[in-house]
Structure formats: C-alpha cells, structure tokens
Image (tube, helix red, strand yellow):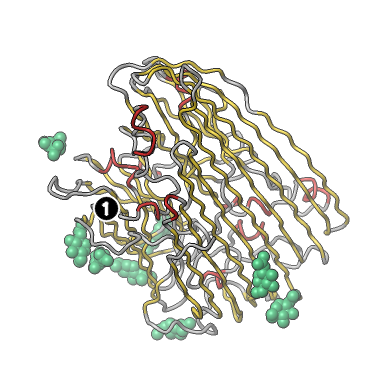
C-alpha cells in the first residue's frame, strides 16, 4: 500500500518510496480516558449564546460501509410553525477503528454545497466521534424549499473498507441575540444600519436564489479536476432580475496535490532523477471564468486534513478548517453584464499547475429585483507577476517564489435602486520559500498568502453607497526532519506546523468591522515502521479570537493546549481584548 501524497511530501532517498501514511498507534500513545473520544475543531460556538433551538430536523442517519460512496435522502424544510432566523447544519460522524486513508466528504442540497469536511481516523480499537456545526443561514432560499434531495458523498482515497456512521441534522434558532458573534464574517443582521434609505437593506441578507455549479451525485456533486489542462464547466442561464450576485467556491486538494505547497520545482526533480513525475512547484490557484473570460482567482487556504503530516498532532484537536473547509466568495455583481441576456453562459473551473486531483464545486447566490435589470461591464484582464529564485546543490536547495495578482473590474447595474456602479479590486500576494537541507532530509516551508478585496459602490451622483474591505492573511510554516533509520524503513520523523488564518471584514457605510484570528503551533515526532507509528510524542497549541466592533460587543476567544493527546488547557472567554 502506498499513498502517493505522502510519498511526495516526504520524498527523499532516506525514506523508502513505499512509505505510507501510518495509522496504527494505540500500542504506545496515551489511550484516551474515555472509550469514546470526541474530536474537535477549534472554532466559534454555535449558537453563540446557548439559546434553545426553535426546532430541528434529523435528515439523515447512514453508515458508510465501504470506500467511495454516496447517499441521498429527501429534504423537508421545518414546518411553518417553527419561527427561525438562523439555521445550523450539524454533521455528526462516528468511527470505530480503524479506517485507513484520507477521507473527504461533502453535503449538498440539489447540488448546492453546504459543507466540505475531512474525516478523522481512529487507531486500532478506538471509537471516535465529532460534531461539525456550521451556520447555513446564507442558504435560506434552499433550506426553505420542499421536495429537495440532500446528498452526502464520502470519498475514501485509498480503497479500504471503512465504516463511518454519519448523521445530518438542521437546527433552527429564532434569534442569535449576539449574531454578531457569528463565525461567518458576514452575518445577516446588521444590514438595517444606513442601508434603509438606499433600498439596500438586503445587502447582507441571504440570496433569493442559489443555483449549483456542480455535477451529478453519482461521482459526488463536485467536479474532479485531474490536471492543469482539465477545464470543468457548467452552462447556466440566470434571471434577468438579478441585481447582485456572489459565486461561492468550495475546493479541496488530494492525491499528489494534498500538500501542493511543499512541491519543489520540477527542475529539482529532473536534475537528480528523483522522479519523472511532474509536480509543478508550489503555487496553485483555482481559476473561474465566464465564457472564457477570467473573473475569479482563488488561492486556497492550505487546510491540513485530519491525518495530515503527522496524524498524532491532531489528537483530538484537528487543524484549521479540517472539519469545515473554507469556501471563497467571488463578487460577481460587476460581471452581471456578461450574464443578463437570457442566454446560457459557461462558467468554468481550472487549477493552475494542478496535479491530480482537485474537487471543486460552486454555488451562485443571486439577489433579485422585482423587474428586469440592465447591466454593463467594463472588464480588465487580471494581471499576474511571478518572480522565482531556485538554487540547489545536490539534494539541498532553496526555492523561492513570489506571485502577485491584481484584478480590477467595474460594472454598472440599472435596477429599481437606480444606476449603481460597482468597482471590485483585489490584490493577492503569495510567497513560498522551501528549503531542503541535511542531504534532503530536512524540509522547511515558509509561506504567506495575503489578499485584500475592495468593493466600492457609488450611485449616479457619485455618492458612496457601499465600501467593503475584506483582508485575509494565511501564514504557514512547516518543518519536517527525517532522522536516521533505526532499522530498515523506520525513520524518526520530527514535524512542526505553525499556521494562521486571519480574516477581517469592514463595511464603512454600515460601521461593521469583524476580525477573526486563528493560530496553531504544533510539534511532534514519530518513529514509523511500515504503516505503524511505533512511538511518538506531540504537542498542539491553538487559539481562536473573534472580535466584532459593533457597539464594542461580540467577542469570543478560546485557547487550547494539548500534550500527548491530553487536553491540559482549555479556556474560553467572551471578553474583548483590545
Ligand atoms: C436517526 O436516528 C435517531 C435515533 O435513533 C432517530 O430518532 C431518528 O428518527 C433517525 N432519523 C432518520 C432520518 O432516520
Ligand atoms: C445517528 O444515527 C444512528 C442510526 O444510524 C443512531 O443510532 C444514533 O442515535 C444517531 N445519533 C444522533 C446523534 O442522532
Ligand atoms: C469494498 O469496495 C472494494 C472496491 O469497490 C471492493 O473490492 C471490496 O470487496 C469491498 N469490500 C467490502 C467489505 O465490501
Ligand atoms: C485490538 O483488539 C484486538 C481484539 O481484542 C486485539 O487482538 C488487538 O491486539 C487490539 N489492538 C491493539 C493495538 O490494542
Ligand atoms: C412534492 O412532489 C410531489 C411529486 O412531484 C408532489 O405531489 C407534492 O405535492 C410535492 N410536495 C410539496 C410539499 O410540494
Ligand atoms: C462495517 O459494517 C459492516 C456492516 O454493519 C460489518 O459487517 C463490518 O464488520 C464493519 N466493519 C468494521 C471494520 O467495523
Ligand atoms: C526528534 O525529536 C526527538 C524527541 O524530541 C529528539 O530526541 C530527536 O533528536 C529528534 N530528531 C531529529 C532528527 O531532530
Ligand atoms: C511555537 O511553540 C514553540 C514552543 O512550544 C515556541 O518555541 C515557538 O516560538 C512557537 N512559535 C510560534 C510562531 O509561536
């Protein structure tokens, strides 16, 4: 058995190419104190204030018994007597040791994706479970409809028998009093401020209509992108009444590209005849086009899945986004000029430098006026600047690449709100530095992805109607040292992962400002023999901070320290730290 992803991540001559993801470790690690151990992702609590739900619906109970599989059920919305304003999706999974491999799952209703999640693996004879809770209020127009089909796909990336029992429920709350505590950076409560007189009250409210840009369930609703030339597309025709649109993209990376950011350039591989495989270096982006015109570029957050790099690190607190992979919003409003003509248009996805394989699916959120809308776009092709510096000698070397992307588009919308001009500018800066030393047995990554997106909307009189700024900073440092083998094929591997996710959103006109700051610092060592870890140790330190400036309210922070799988510190606070 050989998992290619790991082979690439750890490829050096000191590790046999048959090295595979170890999964067996109960023989040495501190056993969990309870027979059923819960796994967690450190994130916002939902609901933020422990209020009782108005109602809930258990939609699905299912045991996935073997490999890649999907299940579909009928989705029924809550009864009309249930009063609610916020909806939470709960994905509960349980697994009795030991499924092997990397498992990814998705939840869709009629092809509209609500959740992308990676699945944790227990070791021998362990039972683990976890609950993922996600605010799905933005899917209002879908979850209020009758007669829809909900589907769950679970993909096991190496064909081994696997039993996961999964329950999916929707829980509805009448009010999150403190909805500004919401984990999502944009919530739907604050719109009353300043927008009423402009008729833009619905600015931060859920869309009227969401259409899936996905495929059929029998292979998962996601598109499977195999390489950089693989273009996946869907033809859509959208309502002429659309005055605002956002494309929400879900993406995950697997197989040879699970650790895309650790890939040295192909010239390194070629020079030392390590492989004739193309791994295309460490830069990836998902490109979104409308009729072949590039309209969206997403540099994905490098989510480390539940057993990535060193599975011991994530017992029982998984890495950032592992249970709730981020989705990415692309402001489509300026591009409505391409779409509002009652004709079909192709929306397509591609992965720059992509290596097998990527799973992509998207939702087009649309806000409708009461009559037809006219739209015009002044399109500028996004720019790209690349600077790289590769320097290697023997197996050691330093590879540095910096990429800058700039997008700027203007669109005019003539609707019942008058003529509004929307200008969207986005700047993305990517920097990746890989260093291989100690004859290739040590690999260090320093990576930073930074994006700043500005949306500025003005009316006919050139008065500012809306100005939002979204900033994202994704730092990731990884250090992997492979020691000498203690016996054939049993190297000691020491790993450190330091990762962050900082996101801020501000809307000047509405006086909204939200900041989320997530950090982790984990280190561990493992002695590997075949597919077993024969000894090891770990430390996992994480924190989460959320701050909302409306009225100085709305803060949440939590800090967790785990040593040898035992949670030694777990502190939460609702107090704002300035
Ligand atoms: C799922 O299982 C629970 C507990 O056994 C049960 O109450 C519920 O009705 C089941 N739901 C479905 C959709 O089968
Ligand atoms: C999940 O579904 C199973 C049946 O498949 C049921 O036994 C269990 O009680 C359910 N758990 C929850 C939390 O609903
Ligand atoms: C699981 O699926 C694989 C591939 O489809 C098949 O070869 C194997 O026999 C199945 N195992 C079980 C226990 O059903
Ligand atoms: C798991 O349980 C089986 C049966 O009880 C036992 O033979 C095996 O040694 C156990 N494995 C570990 C790693 O404890
Ligand atoms: C659901 O669809 C069926 C068959 O298409 C139809 O008879 C039924 O009225 C629909 N139910 C609702 C609540 O719309
Ligand atoms: C998975 O479930 C099937 C059916 O319930 C059972 O026969 C099989 O033994 C289970 N496999 C494991 C590894 O628990
Ligand atoms: C790995 O970590 C262990 C324990 O912390 C240490 O004894 C060992 O020297 C380290 N090995 C390498 C290659 O750094
Ligand atoms: C991570 O933790 C180690 C000690 O556990 C500390 O030395 C190091 O400075 C931390 N790194 C960051 C970036 O916080």
Relative placement, left or right, of 474 versus 462 is: right
- As rendered, which of 273 and 195 lies closer to the eye? 195
- As rendered, which of 88 and 85 lies closer to the eye? 85
**Where, quadrant-wise, is the C terminus in this rendering?**
bottom right
Name the residue rendered at 40%, 72% in the picture: 38
Q: Quadrant of ligand 6?
A: bottom left
Residue 196 visible (yes or no): yes
Residue 116 placed where, x, y %?
Answer: 43, 51
- As rendered, which of 213 and 377 lies closer to the eye? 377
Label 1: few (<14), some or many (≥20) within 10 Å? some
Name the residue rendered at 63%, 50% in the picture: 260
Q: Is 16 drawn above or below residue 429 in the view shown?
A: below
Q: Which residue is mark 1?
A: 175
Residue 15 placed where, x, y %?
Answer: 71, 67
Q: Is 271 drawn above or below residue 161 in the view shown?
A: above
Residue 187 placed where, x, y %?
Answer: 39, 46
Residue 2 placed where, x, y %?
Answer: 59, 61
Name the residue rendered at 47%, 29% in the picture: 332
Relative placement, left or right, of 537 versus 323 is: right
**Where, quadrant-wise, is the N terminus in this rendering?**
bottom right
Q: In the displayed image of the protein, which residue is found farthest to the front? A: 551
Relative placement, left or right, of 447 versus 86 is: right
Q: Is 256 drawn above or below residue 212 in the view shown?
A: below
- As rendered, which of 555 and 232 lies closer to the eye? 555
Q: Secondary structure at mark 1?
A: loop
Q: Quadrant of residue 517?
A: bottom right
């Amino acid at each position: 058995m050989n998992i290619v992803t790991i082979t690439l991540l750890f490829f050096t001559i000191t590790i046999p190419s048959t090295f595979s993801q170890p999964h067996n470790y109960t023989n040495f690690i501190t056993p969990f104190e309870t027979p059923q151990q819960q796994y967690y992702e450190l994130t916002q609590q939902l609901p933020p204030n422990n209020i009782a739900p108005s109602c809930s619906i258990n939609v699905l109970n299912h045991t996935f018994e073997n490999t890649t599989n999907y299940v579909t059920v009928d989705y029924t919305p809550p009864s009309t007597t249930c009063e609610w304003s916020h909806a939470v999706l709960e994905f509960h999974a349980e697994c009795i040791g030991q499924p092997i491999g990397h498992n990814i799952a998705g939840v869709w209703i009629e092809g509209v994706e609500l959740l992308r999640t990676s699945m944790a693996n227990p070791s021998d004879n362990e039972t683990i479970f976890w609950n993922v809770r996600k605010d799905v209020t933005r899917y209002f127009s879908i979850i209020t409809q009758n007669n829809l089909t909900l589907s769950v796909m679970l993909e096991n990336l190496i064909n081994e028998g696997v039993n996961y029992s999964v329950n999916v429920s929707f829980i509805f709350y009448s009010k999150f009093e403190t909805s500004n505590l919401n984990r999502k950076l944009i919530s739907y409560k604050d719109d009353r401020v300043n927008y009423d007189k402009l008729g833009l009250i619905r600015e931060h409210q859920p869309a009227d209509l969401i259409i899936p840009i996905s495929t059929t369930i029998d292979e998962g609703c996601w598109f499977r992108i195999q390489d950089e030339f693989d273009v996946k597309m869907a033809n859509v025709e959208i309502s002429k009444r659309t005055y605002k649109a956002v494309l929400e993209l879900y993406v995950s990376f697997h197989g040879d590209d699970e650790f895309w950011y650790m890939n040295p350039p192909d010239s390194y591989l070629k020079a030392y005849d390590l492989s004739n495989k193309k791994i295309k270096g460490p830069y990836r982006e998902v490109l979104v086009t409308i009729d072949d015109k590039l309209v969206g570029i997403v540099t994905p957050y490098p989510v480390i899945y539940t057993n990535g790099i060193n599975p011991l690190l994530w017992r029982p607190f998984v890495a950032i986004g592992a249970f709730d992979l981020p989705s990415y919003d692309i402001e489509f409003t300026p591009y409505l000029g391409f779409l509002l003509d009652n004709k079909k248009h192709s929306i397509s996805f591609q992965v720059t430098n992509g290596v097998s394989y990527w799973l992509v699916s998207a939702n087009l959120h649309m806000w409708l006026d009461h009559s037809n809308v006219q739209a015009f776009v002044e399109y500028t092709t996004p720019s790209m600047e690349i600077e790289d510096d590769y320097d290697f000698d023997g197996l050691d070397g330093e590879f540095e690449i910096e990429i800058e992307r700039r997008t700027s588009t203007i669109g005019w919308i003539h609707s019942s709100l008058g003529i509004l001009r929307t200008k969207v500018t986005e700047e993305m800066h990517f920097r990746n530095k890989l260093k291989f030393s100690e004859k290739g047995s040590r690999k260090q990554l320093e990576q930073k992805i930074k994006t700043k997106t500005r949306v500025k909307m003005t009316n006919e009189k050139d008065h500012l109607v809306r100005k939002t700024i979204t900033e994202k900073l994704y730092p990731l440092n990884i250090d992997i040292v492979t020691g000498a083998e203690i016996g054939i094929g049993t190297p000691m591997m020491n790993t450190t992962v330091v990762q962050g996710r900082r996101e801020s959103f501000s809307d000047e006109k509405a006086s909204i400002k939200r900041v989320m700051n997530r950090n982790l610092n984990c280190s561990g060592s493992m002695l590997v023999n075949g597919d077993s870890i024969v000894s090891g140790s770990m430390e996992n330190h994480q924190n989460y901070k959320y701050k909302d400036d409306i009225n100085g309210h709305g803060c949440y922070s939590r800090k967790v320290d785990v040593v040898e799988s035992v949670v030694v510190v777990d502190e939460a606070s609702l107090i704002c730290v300035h």
